Amino acid sequence: MSPTTHSAKTAANVHRPVNGKKFPTSTYRVQLRKEFGFEKAEALVEYLKSLGVTHLYCSPYLQATPGSAHGYDVVNHSIINEELGGEKGFETLIKKLHSHGLRAIADIVPNHVSVADPEHLNPYWWDVLKNGRNSKYGGYFDVEWDHPQLKGKILLPVLGGQPADLVKNGEIKYETKGPDGVDGPVIRYYSHVFPVKPGTENLKHNIEQLLDAQNYRLAFWRVTMDGLLNYRRFFDVTTLAGIRVEDESVFRESHKIFIQQIKDGVLDGLRVDHPDGLADPQQYVERLAEATDGSWIVIEKILEEGEELPASWPCAGTSGYDALIRLNGLLVDRKSEKALTDVYAKFTGLTGDFNSVMKTSKHLILEKSLRAEVERLMSLLVLVQQDDASAKALTRENIHEALVALLVAFDVYRAYIQPGKSIPKESLVHLNHAAENAKKALKGSRDSEVDFIVRAASFKVSTSDPAREFVSRLQQTCGPVMAKGIEDTAFYRYFRLASLNEVGGDPGVFGKSVDEFHKASAAMQKDWSLSMTTLSTHDTKRSEDVRARLAVISELPTEWETVVNQWSATADQRGYRTSAALPDKNTEYLFWQTLVGAYPISIDRLTAYMDKATKEGKVHTSHTDANKDFDAAVKSYAEKVLADTDLITSISTFVNRIKPFGRLNSLAQKTIQLTMPGIPDVYQGCEVEDYSLVDPDNRREIDYEARKSLLAKLDSAAPQPPADATDNSGAGKMWVVSRLLRLREEHPDVFVGPEASYTALAVMGQKDVDNVVAFERSGKVVTVAPRFWVGVKEGGALKGVSVRVPEGEWRNVLTGETVKGGVVDVERLVRAFPVAVLVKQ
């Protein structure tokens, strides 16, 4: 098997059918927005073709909030976003893709829509606000119409103060004519306008009475923290209202464009955003698979340690965070766990582990951000309690305490219990595990209450409507508690090694062994071989290259301790703190890791990240209760450090020390990702080095002209690899990405499909060897990737290490060298390039 010269002609078998349907061989994610619409995506087609990509992976492209930077705030499911170029622009993009042998997949948002500015954004929400529960879209949204305090009205917490005060000051007004496209009178609050209920126009001279007569209640935005809200939302975002796709008519309405595009051959597949927010994810995936005739569908499912995707789901797998966590863990040296734990504790004075930080963070989220969701669960539990004789004596207060403890103890996004169907064994395991931990946390004082909630959650009390709703809403609440409590709070409070703080990961788990990786990969090939893999996304906390560089610290804990203490002491001596306590030592520790991981970085990017990170952490400041003194102190500290020539010289020296190893880490993980089981995605721009932080930093404009030029330069010099794979040009990573994507395109069946296989290869040495990842795909491709590069380059860790390559003659696609099968010396194998991918001749 010999790779051919790359050209459009070699793509004849790329889109081969598997089980009768077409699937990608690789994807390339682009973030569509007003500044980067279909026309600019179209301009990338030739480049993506040359890179070896088979499918363009588009972020959501239905009509969204004007100026949306991501597209997840959909406002109209029947329109392709006009800001991106509309239907005509999309059709032109698809034609261009198809003319070059490429295809497309789309990111879809079934859980929620934006209701930020209903007048010109969301026709469904506008009609519901105007006509109330009698609206033709009344069943579209997940509204608790019988809320005892709201009595048939939808609460809209959008005001900057109390309604009466705003009316008195003339800030809420009646207008006879609304904006363009809106029929009839409206109520205006600055840029917000709301419909007037038909028949109430005569109250226009008394605004307070007019407001009272509407199908909605305008309220101060902070009321959600008091638990008063009666529509389901996305996490704690009140401007994103949940929709009821469990209703088949809502499903059809919200998916009609994508179903038709699949049917017409415009799309080959879909990525589904946040299915855990839905009432019944399994029903949804089944319905979507049927509607798309079994097309390639991956779902944004966050799998926790030890959790598996339900085997009964008719989808290709996940959007790849599980693979990301395994690959990220391979870069972290477990032997340094105690050393870095001690460094962190000494520097910050904090001794709690991640588990304790996580529990505290979840409690905070339940007490503040998600109070409304807890109150809704409680109102349902009170109804269910009436059918449980053994629970009738339990007080509401004690049940509430037990419910909060159970939600904190739940360690996965949901248990996947379906009303009217038998409960999967693994669901009961998760539920009972949470119950056991909740009882322990409450020290046995609320065992009866916890047991009652578990009975209700497993339909052992009743199958009444309130009981069924409780089961769905409990699971719909578990996801936000995990996401907001862990990813958006605890990850910004615990910084032992910041590269481990990634979506789907557990910072308390310090690294992964090669054996663990092989077992997980073999299982993936067996059960989810078409699942997506990724290293960077629009939601990752740090790009793959930032994580790869920070992972080097796990090999140099003593050096790290020395420099970080020196930098801190210098900053203190020069008075960079605004006070002895500002910024705090934990924030400072994150600051130094961020600066090292993303260096060089502009002051604007660094201060914007630190502001977001500290507000997400919610310790000293937050998005809802900003502490101006603290925010100013952090910003000032960052500015002074970056302006200090001596400090920056020292930081630059350390970065230059670890930068080559970080780049080697990056090459290793990218090589593994592109050859392991699954469908690899390359996030926009990450075919070369990218040192981005969390959004919006990772959604910045990409310099594609530089990337095109680099790829052309490499191709002109081929088959020789870059002379220095770790220099500043990014050539090493571009070489790996382009050569391996082309390999996948030319020989897809080796990597994807029923005949593909994955086998770990034996790595041998004078003692146990755990610093080389080696595996074979389908008997035709072998990957060899060292790890722990400090030890490799400075400690001779590869001396005497060999890998057993299957018999035959092999060609290294990254160097052109020929290798004979048998026991092969790893050090020789990676002498010309840091990693090796061998193709059988």
Image (spheres, rainbow, N blue to C red):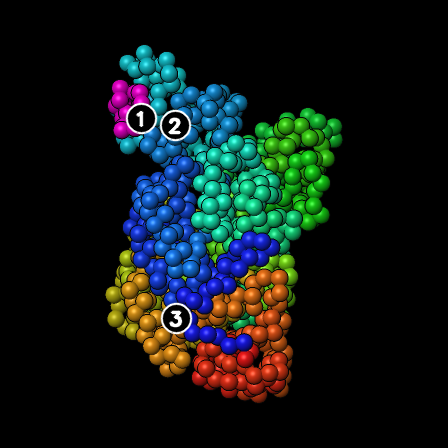
Q: How crowded is mark 3: few (under 14 residues within 10 Å), some or many (20 or more)?
A: many
Using the image, tell me which numbered label, if any, was put on residue 734. Answer: 3
225 up-or-down from 130: above or below:
below
753 up-or-down from 109: above or below:
below
Helix, strand or loop: magenta stretch = loop
Amino acid of disc 2: Trp
746 up-or-down from 189: above or below:
below
**Are the residues at dot 2 and dot 1 in contact (C-beta closer than 8 Å)?**
yes
Q: In the image, residue 33 lies at what x, y percent?
A: 33, 49
For the residues labelled 2 and 1, the Cα–Cα distance comes to: 10 Å
> In this figure, which residue is indicated by the disc labeled 2?
126
Q: In the image, residue 254 lies at what x, y percent?
A: 47, 37
Q: Is residue 317 visible from the viewing direction of this image? A: no
For the residues labelled 2 and 3, the Cα–Cα distance comes to: 48 Å
Q: Which residue is at the front of the view, 507 or 232?
A: 232
Say which element carries label 1. Answer: loop
Using the image, tell me which numbered label, if any, was put on residue 525. Answer: none
Pick out the residue farthest to the top: 202
Going from N to C along the chain, the mark reached first, 2 or 1, is 2
Going from N to C along the chain, the mark reached first, 2 or 3, is 2
For the residues labelled 3 and 1, the Cα–Cα distance comes to: 51 Å
Q: What quarter of the picture does the C terminus occupy?
A: bottom right
> In this figure, which residue is indicated by the disc labeled 1?
182
Q: Which residue is drawn at 61% across and 85% down?
A: 822
Residue 48 in the figure: left or right of residue 378: left
Q: Which residue is at the front of the view, 300 or 575?
A: 300
- Segment colored magenta: 170-188
Q: How crowded is mark 1: few (under 14 residues within 10 Å), some or many (20 or more)?
A: some
Q: Which residue is drawn at 56% across and 68% down?
A: 750
Residue 469 in the figure: left or right of residue 228: right
